[in-house]
Amino acid sequence: MRLLIKNIKGLIQVEEKPKLKVCGRDMSVINIISDAYLLLENGLISDFGTMKDLNRKSAIEQSGKLKAIDASGKFVFPSFCDSHTHLVYADSRETEFTGKIRGLSYEEIAKRGGGILNSARKLHATSEDELYEQSSARVVEIISQGTGAVEIKSGYGLNLEDELKMLRIIKRIRKNFPIEIISTFLGAHAVPGEYKENREKYVDLVINEMIPVVASEELADYIDVFCDKGFFTVEDTERILMAGLKYGLRAKIHANELDFSGGVQTGVKYNALSVDHLERSGDDEFRALLDSDTMPTILPGSAFFLGLPDPPARKMIDAGLPVAMASDYNPGSSPSGNMKLIMSLACIRLKMLPEEAINAVTINSAYAMGISETHGSIARGKVANVFITKEMPSYEFFPYAFGSELIEKVILNGKVV
Ligand code: NIG
Ligand code: FE
C-alpha cells in the first residue's frame, strides 16, 4: 500500500536525523518543508521532499499501486502523541464540575468521597463490555482529533480484580484500533475508603498482590503512583517504584500537582521515564530534572479545568529542560483528549511558542511513552501516523484558532481512517 500526499503547503516537524527528544532553546525550532510531498509505504514514512524533488523522481509516481492525495493549501503534521490519559473510565462526573463552580476544591471533593473514589465505584458497577464500549468511543474521538499514539492508565479499579479489568480493556483497545497504545498500571491512584486509616496496607496490596499479577500477565508497560498531598507519600512511592522495577516496570509518575510533594525528585531518583503535572515546581525540581533522562510532562488541560496554578513551562524551557505535553483525559480533572486545544492552552496561558507546543505534543511526548524512535516526527522509517489540516494561512493558525476544527484527514499506519 503506497500513499503519496502532494502539494503540501507545509510539512511540519521533519527530521533528517531523528532525535529522541528536544530540550530548552531547541524547542523553539521545528523543521518545515514548504510545497512538499510525503510518501507513505507499507505503514511507514518512506520519503519526503519538495515538489521540485518529486518531479525529478518521476519513478515514484509511475511505479506500483499508488493512491495520491492533493494537499494544496494544507499542512501535514505528525500525529499527536498523548503520553498521559485515563480514558478508560465509567461515566462522567459533571456533578463535581458544578460543585467546583460553587467553590469546592479538588481535594475537598476527594475528601467527600468524590473524585477518583467516585469513579472507582462507578467502574466497579459497570460491566467489562460496557466499559469497553464507553472507552472505545473516546478512542474514536481522539483519533478524529489527530492523536496517533496514546498512553492509558489503570487506577479507577483500586483492587486487583478491577485494576485487571481496566488493563484488559486497554489491551483490547490496542488490538482493535489502529492507534499506538501504551499501558500504565496505576494501582496507587488513590487510597480506597476501607484503607483510609491504613494506607500502608493498601501499598502492601499494590506491591504484593497487584504488581506480580499485572507483570506476569504482561498487562502494563509502565507503572505510576500519584505522589502528592492527600494521596501517596514519597516513602509509599519509593516502595512501589522499587517493586515495579523488580518486575521490569519503569515509572511514569504523577507529581507536584497539589503540593511541592518531592515527587519530581523521587521520579528522577528512580529514573522515571516521565514526571507529570508539575504545577508546583521550581528551581529544586528543575535542578533534579536537568541531566536526567526523565521527561517533565505538563498537563495544561487539568490546570485549566481545576483552576490550578499553571505549570511553569516557560521557566522550564528557559532553564534548558525539555517539556512534553499531554491531555490527562479523565473524568475529574480534564474531560477532554483534544490535543489541539492543549496546544492552544500552552500558547495562550503558558506563553509557549507554537513551535515549542508542537515539539511538546509530538517528539517529546513520544519520548515520554518510550516510542520516540518510531513516532513523534516525520522521519524516514517512522510509523506513518500523520494528519492533514484544512486549508490554513500558516501553521501558527492551528493553535491560534483555538475553537476551530482544523483537521481534515487522519492517516494511521499509512491508511486514511
Ligand atoms: O491526573 N491527579 C490524579 N489523577 C488524575 C485525576 C483523576 C480524577 O480526578 O479522576 C489527574 O488529574
Ligand atoms: Fe493523570
Image (tube, rainbow, N blue to C red):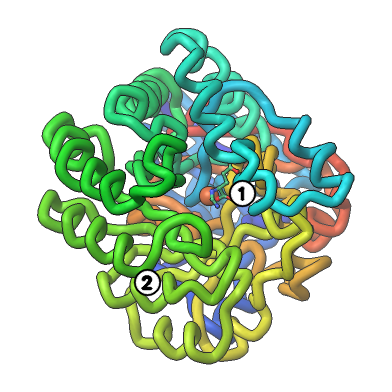
The numbered mark at residue 318 is none
Q: Residues within 10 Å of mark 2 (few under 14, many from 20)?
A: many
Question: Is 365 positioned to the left or the right of 6 in the image?
Answer: left
Give the residue type at disc 2: Thr
Task: Check the image and report above or below for 88 versus 342.
Answer: above
Task: Check the image and report above or below for 4 versus 47.
Answer: above
Quadrant placement of the N terminus: top left
Task: Please report whichever mark, 1 or 2, sits nearer to the chain's N-terminal start.
Answer: 2
Q: CB atoms at circles 1 and 2 under 8 Å apart?
A: no
Question: Is 252 positioned to the left or the right of 247 in the image?
Answer: right
Q: In which quarter of the image is residue 113?
A: top right
The numbered mark at residue 294 is 2
The residue wearing badge 1 is 327
Q: Does the residue labelled 1 lie within 8 Å of ligand 2?
A: no
Residue at image coords 78%, 49% = 104
Q: Position of residue 381 (x, y in %)?
A: 34, 50
Of residue 238 and residue 88, the one placed in the foreground of this image is 238
Residue at image coords 61%, 49% = 327
Residue at image coords 26%, 47% = 201
Q: Can residue 155 be seen in this view?
A: yes
Give the residue type at disc 1: Ser
Q: What element carries label 1?
A: loop
Residue with the most extreme front position = 197
Q: Is residue 55 visible?
A: no
Residue at image coords 50%, 82% = 321
Task: Check the image and report above or below for 292 versus 376.
Answer: below
Q: Where is residue 279 in the image (x, y as percent from the top left)?
A: 62, 69
Q: In which quarter of the image is residue 153?
A: top left
